Image: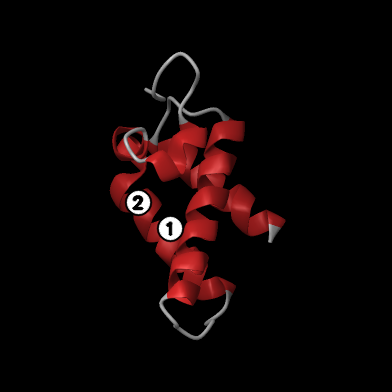
Amino acid sequence: MEERFDRLANLLQKKNLALTNHEAREWVEGLWEDFESTRAKAGWEYEGQEVTEKMVTQLITSYGHKLHEYFSNNPKFQRFVKKDGPIQ
């Protein structure tokens, strides 16, 4: 699991140069957790880490460069907003 998170965090850092390694890792863990909990709440059967990794990879590939624009306005992800303002 750690390898998956590290790989995804590195991918996110390449897409969004403003993120530190620690911040990218937090984003990855948050996206991972959100995807799995949303699927569970919707009643979907658990399909494994591969499905979650694929989805998080797609999110990073499509939106990684501007995640801070969306999540800084969403209260659910306020923990990803720096104290001095949104991650830029």
Residue at mark 2: 61
Tell me where residue 23 appears, x and y as whole percent: 55, 33
- Residue in the picture at 51% in, 66% down: 37
Measured as percent of width and height from the top left, residue 88 is found at 37, 22
Q: Mark 1: give few (<14), some (14-19) or many (20+) Cα within 10 Å.
A: many
Dot 1 lies on which element? helix
Instruction: Give the label on residue 34, or none.
Output: none
In the picture as drawn, the residue positioned furthest to the bottom comes out as 45
In percent of width and height, residue 10 lies at 54, 42
Give the labeled residue for mark 1.
57
Q: Is residue 88 left or right of residue 34?
A: left
Q: Kindly state the secondary structure of the residue where label 2 is placed.
A: helix
The crowd level at tag 2 (other Cα within 10 Å; few <14, some 14-19, many 20+) is: some
The structure's colour scheme is secondary structure
CB under 8 Å between discs 2 and 1: yes
Amino acid type at circle 1 is Thr
Nearer to the camera, 46 or 17: 46
The picture places residue 62, in percent across and down from the top left corner, at 29, 51
Q: CA distance from mark 2 to mark 1?
A: 6 Å
Indicate the quadrant containing the N terminus: top left, top right, bottom left or bottom right. Answer: bottom right
Among the 4 quarters of the image, the one containing residue 38: bottom left
Q: Looking at the image, which residue is at 70% across and 55% down?
A: 2
- Name the residue type under label 2: Thr
Q: Is residue 74 above or below residue 88?
A: below
Q: What is the number of callouts on the image?
A: 2
Q: Which of the 4 quarters of the picture holds residue 49?
A: bottom right
